[in-house]
Amino acid sequence: YLFARYLHRGMDINKFDNQLLDKKPVRDLVVNEILVEGHYHGVRVFLNSMLKTGHSQRTELPNQLQKLAKSLEEHITALPQHAEPSDRHTNALTVTLPTPNLFYTLLNCLDGTLNETERKRVVRSAFQHPFHFSTFLYWRSGQLFQRVLSYYDDADAVDVERIVKELLHEPMTLRYSPDSYVIVWNNEASKDVVEKVLEFMGKNGENLKQVLNPEQSKFRPLHTSVTLLHFFIFNEYYNCLLSQFLRFLSSIFVDDHNFTELIKFTLKMQDYNNDNWTFPSNNGIEKTLDILRDLSRPRVMEGLCHFALVTGVFENYYQPFAADDEDSLRDPARMTRLHWAAFNGDMEAMESVGNWTCSVDDSFTPFYVAAARHHKLICHTILASLKGILTADELRKQYKGFVYTAMWDAVCFHNFKMFQLILESVKQA
């Protein structure tokens, strides 16, 4: 305590009781040892408490603190660039994060001494690998993170990707116990950190295109876009941030097909911690469609219409296309007149159309529509009629065949009545 008090008298920006920082060897000792080494932790804790009211009343940083800033700059920039120490806290800035008042004091010294380019270089050097940005999430330090983030306002793609991966993507892919998950994620402090990351992403969209890869249409569970989107859709605690994140993704995924494929894959994906199967079946699709409608992405909504159908919310978002076009023309819900006849259970209208195989996308057939609407007679009639047209493999095994996609969408979204109807129709046919 007495040591911390003596240090405080030499570092108080408003009042100096000693000449502690006048000599360079002493400043170097403070920066290289006292602010870094573990056995001085108690000194730093006491010093931190003494600095809590140390707001500057001066317009210019005292000469002693400017010298301290220069010593801090030398300390950080002299660190080995490719070192892999077992202890990640290798410099005065990262070590003092748990003592925020002391940490802010050091940053204020840098801000008051160095120009913008110099201080950004110093801070970024301090927080380079092996420091991990998830520290701010686990410590629930939104204010600390925001202060550090201010030195990355013109960061390149490498730094931007690293921050997003270490703070969001990597922690989201870990498996947690239910209690641990709540401790890490479902609290206001963590949400504050996540919100600040989203704001940072919104300002750095161009630098994130490589990691988000909006040009691709094939996705896997650990893809960054999939991981983040699944988290915001299915973690109820983050409902308030889903719109913000989807708006950001919409600005990145300008191609309707790729954006649709991303959302489709995500809505059907299982996750260790946010299992969409544990939520009401229409939960994810309803929230997503609401936001897509606000974003004016009708083609993406069109590509998700079968999810709305199987979850029972179709009529909230799609209406028949009022036009006297040919049967093969699709309305905004990808529905031909044949599909609408199956939707309404109108066998007479279906027979008047005649060709029951008229489907550009074999995964979204009139059979799918009839099954989702629980029209057993139409399902049985369609399969019985197509038995002589399509092979058994097309009916039962083909990935985008008449039966496969409808059956597994029913399973995925817990539409057990639809699933049972499909099994009965196949058996009867």
Image: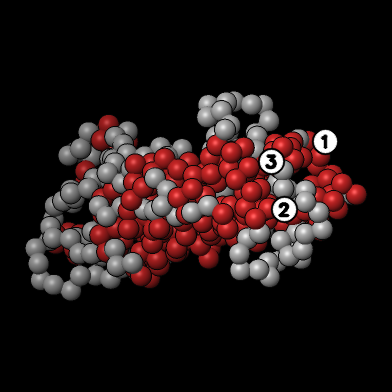
Q: Can residue 419 be seen in this snapshot?
A: no
Q: What is the secondary structure assignment of the residue under circle 1?
A: helix
Q: Which residue is mark 2?
A: 102
Q: Is residue 80 visible?
A: yes
For marks 2 and 3, give the one nearer the viewer: 3
Expressed as whole percent of the image width and height from the top left, the position of residue 211 reads 38, 41
Amino acid carrying mark 3 in the image: Lys
Mark 3 to mark 1 CA distance (whole Å)? 22 Å
- Badge 2 vs badge 3, beta-carbon distance below 8 Å: no
Is residue 259 shown left or right of residue 278?
left
Q: CA distance from mark 2 to mark 3?
A: 20 Å
At label 3, counting other C-alpha atoms closer than 10 Å, the crowd grade (few under 14, some 14-19, many 20 or more) is some
Dot 1 alpha-carbon crowd within 10 angstroms: few under 14, some 14 to 19, many 20 or more: few
Q: Which mark is residue 24?
A: 3
* Percent of width and height locating residue 387: 23, 39
Instruction: Please name the residue shown 13% across and 60% down the image.
Output: 329
Q: CA distance from mark 1 to mark 2?
A: 17 Å
**Of all residues shown, which one is farthest toward the right?**
2
- Label 2 residue SS: helix
Contact (Cβ within 8 Å) of mark 3 with mark 1? no
Which quadrant of the figure contains the C terminus?
A: top left
Locate residue 94 relative to residue 54 in the image: left or right.
Answer: left
- Inspect the image, locate mark 1, and give the three-letter code of the amino acid beneath it: His
Q: Residue at x 56, y 54 (%)?
A: 113
| Disc nearer the start of the sequence (2/3) | 3
- Counting other residues with Cα less than 10 Å from the Cα at mark 2, is it few (<14), some (14-19), or many (20 or more)? many
Residue pictured at 40% horizontal, 37% vertical: 220
User: Could you tell me the amino acid type at mark 2?
Assistant: Leu
Q: Which numbered disc covers residue 39? A: 1
Residue 279 in which image quadrant: bottom right
Q: Earlier in the sequence, mark 3 or mark 1?
A: 3
